[in-house]
Image: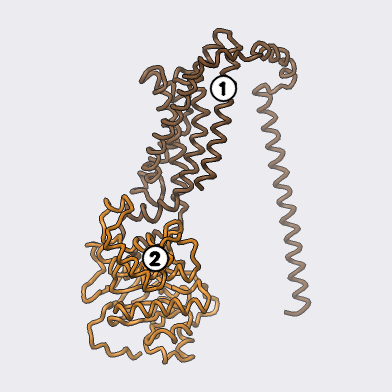
Amino acid sequence: MNAPMIEVKPMISIRGLSKTYAGGVRALNNVSIDVAPGEFLVILGPSGAGKSTLLRCINRLVEPSQGQVFHNGTEITGHRSDLRAIRRQFGMVFQQFNLVKRLSVLVNVLAGRLGYRSVLRSLFYSFPEADKRIAIECLARVNMEHKAFQRADTLSGGEQQRVAIARALAQQPTVILADEPVASLDPKIARQVLGYLRQVAQELGITVLCNLHQVDYAKEFSERVVGMSRGSVVFEGASSELTDEVLHRIYYREPGETVKEEA
Amino acid sequence: MSTATFELAIAGTLAEELQRRMRRRTKALIWATATIAVLWFTAAQIGLNPIALAKGIPFMADFFSRMFPPDLTHLPLLRDATVETIQIAVWGTLIAILLSVPFALLGAKNTTPHPIVFHATRLFLNALRAINELVFALIFVAAVGLGPFAGVLAIALHATGMLAKFCAEEIEGVDRGPIEAMQAAGAGRLQVILFGIVPQVIPAFISYSIYRFDVSIRAATILGLVGAGGLGFSLIKTMKLFKYHETATCILVIFVIVLISDWVCARVRARIL
């Protein structure tokens, strides 16, 4: 495996990361990856390969069993220092969008600012003017500002995901973790959403780690791809190097192997 | 698959279906017999007797005839008691709504600070619901004296048990996605509750609260039986004095209040949700 030459200091550096869940399922097995600042990295693999667990170990929605994660040279695993401060560095985008359906689009995006705000202020659902500015600006970046006052559940799937991207941007993160962001969308909308994600990341210099299971999108939207299978990295290279042999390595299963769907 | 094995597989599944159906039928028969036996035995124990009921009809008719016609001149005297009944229901329900929010959060698996707190809260809420308003009213009449305040406390406690339990179950049923999103954004515990959970449970909570107000009105009409204020006191007083025409007036007023409350609650619910 020929890892690309990274001259600059990596934005994310993952070293020997493993995760074994309480039930004994080994979701991650000694994973090491470097991600350059501003890179759009696709993590490709079938359901159950450990992609979701990997992303959640980075912002510690899941505590890794072993290994380290460095963010901009600082270790963010292993100590309980300030989880809020760590998490707000990482915007997250989910397969099911995870918007609060009954709240307006604007308030959903403002929720991305919660990591910076005191509990007391949140008690009254109020945000400073500066936060409102940020939120509307982020909505404008995904062309959704005209729906700011609509309830989130009145939007289509693609629109909801764009709002979710705006929410992640509102955190003013250095990294966006996108967990199967287009798995619930049809191909046309999926391309549009991935296009927005890549565009805003480029404009703002945000590093993106994007889980996908569709090879086509990986080839189309990223230069570098990490292939995962059964908790391990089985490929790392340019998306043009995704040959049939490589894809076989990523997607091959032992006969009779059962797949546990990722949450 | 060859035709022969195909046919064999179908025949096998058909046979199994028949077998399962027979087993289900036997089971249903056994349960039905047992249930009927228990019910029959219970009926004998509690003296369920249609003949006694038939014999009682003349006495009932006599009772109703003494109540009829309701003494409407008594109506103005019931004005204060009626207002008091509604006041007891309003304050009892309001206090219950305020109390049930923290108890619901402590008694929901996904928001409780600790499993021990969860179990303790649920036990406490079950106790509140197990004890009838009338029983609470007896206790509070002894504690704070005769009058509507005892009634308010009685309704507040019993209603808290119900509202908090319903709300806790609603909290446990929320979509986990938004919660995970808030956590990922760096939100603290209380912020996750405020932004991820509260918006999801608020419609159901309002609906339960309105329903509970309706129930409180009905409860408040009888609390006076034990001296905790409201129309119940007039009811028991006129009955004890054998002024059955006035008793009838009380029952009439209670009936009208319940009707109006039912109608108003239905309107409000339709308006809000």
Colour-to-chain, brown:
B
Is A133 on the left or on the right of A81, as rendered? right
The residue under the point 65% across, 23% down is B45
Compare residues B53 and B66 and report the one nearer the observer.
B66
Residue A26 position, x and y percent, is: 40, 70
The residue at which mark 2 appears reads as A21
The residue at which mark 1 appears reads as B253
Q: Amino acid at mark 1?
A: Val
Place residue B19 in its image quadrant: bottom right
Please determine if labels 1 and 2 lie on a single subunit: no
Mark 2 residue crowding within 10 angstroms, few (<14) / some (14–19) / many (20+)? some
Please give the chain letter of the residue carrying mark 2: A
Q: Amino acid at mark 2?
A: Tyr
Q: Label 1, label 2: how many angstroms apart (C-alpha)? A: 64 Å
CB within 8 Å, label 1 to label 2 = no
Residue A15 at least partly seen: no
SS of the residue under disc 2: loop
Is label 1 or label 2 in front? 1
The residue under the point 53% across, 37% down is B265
Compare residues A24 and A14 and report the one nearer the observer.
A14
Please give the chain letter of the residue carrying mark 1: B
Looking at the image, is B48 positioned above or below residue B112? above
Residue B258 at least partly seen: yes
Colour-to-chain, orange:
A
The residue under the point 28% across, 77% down is A12
Residue A5 position, x and y percent, is: 28, 90
* Quadrant for the N terminus of chain B in the image: bottom right
